[in-house]
Image (cartoon, helix red, strand yellow):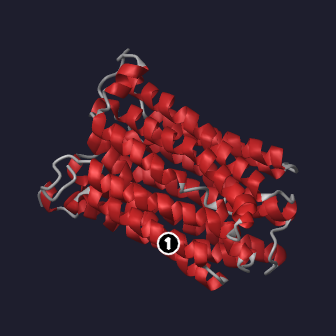
Amino acid sequence: MTPEQRPPTRRLNRNVWVTSATSFLTDVSSEMVLNVLPLFLANVLGVRTSVIGLVEGAAEATASLLKAPVGALSDRLGQRKGLAVLGYGISALAKPFLLVASTWGAVGAARWADRVGKGVRTAPRDALLADSVDESSRGLAFGLHRAADTGGAVVGLLAAIAVVWLAQGGAVALGREAFRTLVLVSLVPALVAVAVLAIGARETGPGSAGDERGAGLALRGLGRRFGVFLAISAVFDLGNFSDAFLVLRAQERGLSVVEVLWMLVAFNAVYAAISTPAGSLSDRIGRKRLLVAGWLFYAAVYLGFAVAETGLHVTALFVAYGAYYGLTAGTAKALVADLVPPRLRGTAFGTYHATLGLIDLPASLIAGILWQGIGSWHGLGPSAPFYLGATLALAAALLLAAFVRAPDEGSGSAR
């Protein structure tokens, strides 16, 4: 059997499987804790949604400040693996601090440290993944990686459901002891994930180690198409605030903490199921086309969140939200790799993740203010941030369709 006759997944490089396994284990750990963190802040510590927005937004902004320089560093050093291992290690070591956190500031500090690790690892890992496959399989590779990442979320959420149920039954609010137990159990897969990447991955540098060009020259080298795509993505992301608000919306519509966790299981199962075929589809029909469709679908889902009246409505919408992620998460990363020179992929991924992450801070702050402030003044209340998100997603989809030309667009492929 020739390489071309093998099933698509058999043609993927070892690094694709190793990074996917690492992300799977990391998400088992993270999803046990992070999805219930806003419930811990609100129910146990009595924190307002505006402060929750600050905690979430500041944490993501912290990660974002690191992504661009670390991505550029991986290009200059010709090293991806070491920086990725370092980042995963920092996140794993940050989690134990949540065991003793008793104020929102302490929780925010632990969340900040976890995001430092994410800021260090994300761009080198994505560049390592892009370097390890050819362009004809790039969408599939990123789709498989997202599927593994999200499959870990399903396992982590199921574990969280078991822990919470054993600790406190079907109580609506999350208790302190249940939260601490979740954190303790989550440490095991986090540490194993670091070991898997450190032992299993093979370095695949960009072939430009020692390149001493300045950051400004490197950024200019990314090209106009990448810059336009990045600007339009920022418009979209301003309405894509922290998913903590979706969790709070579910609880506000009457779901208990265990019901919220089951809702998240369904969300991640759909996300995982769609990611790999969607990535493969983007290899055939083009990344831009699939991304525009995903953003339009997002606008419809967020409009649904705005008008949802029951917990059942929110649950159905959250499952649909998983389909949006499956369609777009891997596709957008593959498009970034398509738009820039291989030697600058670390810089490109770092710049992409950093820009969108920095947008997360104002996006989450605006959402928190709309939820409790401006939205209530105009009778919209918690619906207000979702109306904003739907509007910006629609605008971004139209801009992407009109102003971004993907490589070889019109030939049936994004590349």
Taking the spot 41% from the left edge, 69% from the top edge, the residue there is 297
Q: Secondary structure at mark 1?
A: helix
**On the rendered structure, is 339 left or right of 391?**
left
Instruction: Decide if residue 271 is in sight here.
Output: no
Q: Pinpoint residue 293: horizontal percent, then vertical percent.
A: 34, 65
Q: Amino acid at mark 1?
A: Val
Taking the spot 65% from the left edge, 52% from the top edge, the residue there is 366
* Residue at which label 1 appears: 301
Taking the spot 85% from the left edge, 49% from the top edge, the residue there is 100
Quarter of the image where one finds residue 351: top left
Q: Nearer the viewer, residue 205 or 312?
A: 312
Q: Pinpoint residue 89: horizontal percent, then vertical percent.
A: 61, 40
Instruction: Decide if residue 393 is in sight here.
Output: yes
Q: Nearer the viewer, residue 394 or 78?
A: 394
Q: Pinpoint residue 396: horizontal percent, then vertical percent.
A: 40, 55
* Quarter of the image that includes the N terminus: bottom left
Taking the spot 56% from the left edge, 69% from the top edge, the residue there is 154
Please tell me whether residue 129 is drawn above or below residue 327 in the rendered image.
above
Q: Nearer the viewer, residue 167 or 358?
A: 358
**On the rendered structure, is 258 left or right of 122?**
right
